[in-house]
Image (cartoon, helix red, strand yellow):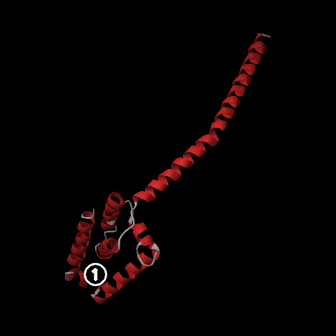
Amino acid sequence: MRALYFRRQGQSKNRDTRSEDRSDRAHNNRKGPLRRWAAAVLLIAGLGLESAAAAPLDEATKQLLIEAVEAAYVVDLYHSRCRSDGSNRRTENLNKLLASRMRMTVLRVQDDVFPERNYRKVQERLQREFLDMLAENGGCAGVKDSELPVEFRARYDEKMRAIEALP
């Protein structure tokens, strides 16, 4: 009899806590739409600030960005194809520089600034041009024996310094 009493007490207690849990959830559900609305407002405001911070680029800056992306991509292709180094270090370094200085990425430059307006098409074209240049110069062995790797690196370094010098 006594066990039955405690069991009933426990059940009623569980029922009470369940109803309290339901009331808490109902209270929190009332806050849900308000929280979602506030999050949406903050997101929209943040997007507005982001677009306001990204100033329109002049033609000289656009050309510099195109040349910098091309230079980084060529150096990375050379290292990947001829030196078995697929780290894409130069593109990553350019990406970091663009993100910190101009609040944009290499992919955004390829999408928005390059004439193709599509990063996949840009990357395909750059790879095709690199492979054509490689074939013209006798493959990796011919390029390694020439001054081209030094020229690739010098062009990349020049473009990186030019971007760092931008206001």
Left or right of 114 on screen, residue 41? right
Q: Who is closer to the viewer here, 97 or 31?
A: 31
At a point 44% along the width and 71% down the height, the residue shown is 112
Please state, as top left, top right, bottom left or bottom right, where the C terminus lies in the image. bottom left
Residue 64: percent from left, percent from top: 31, 73
Q: Quadrant of residue 83?
A: bottom left
Q: Who is closer to the viewer here, 125 or 39?
A: 39
Residue 45: percent from left, percent from top: 50, 51
Residue 5: percent from left, percent from top: 77, 13
Q: Quadrant of residue 159?
A: bottom left
- Count of all numbered marks drawn on residues in the image: 1
Mark 1: give few (<14), some (14-19) or many (20+) Cα within 10 Å. some
Left or right of 10 on screen, residue 88? left
Query: Above or below — where is 105 with respect to 127?
Result: above
Q: Who is closer to the viewer here, 157 or 164?
A: 164
Residue 40: percent from left, percent from top: 56, 49
Residue most extreme to the right:
1
SS class, disc 1 = helix
Mark 1: amino acid: Cys
Please state, as top left, top right, bottom left or bottom right, where the N terminus lies in the image. top right
Q: Who is closer to the viewer here, 129 or 104?
A: 104
Residue most extreme to the bottom:
136
Residue at the spot of label 1: 140
Q: Quadrant of residue 4?
A: top right
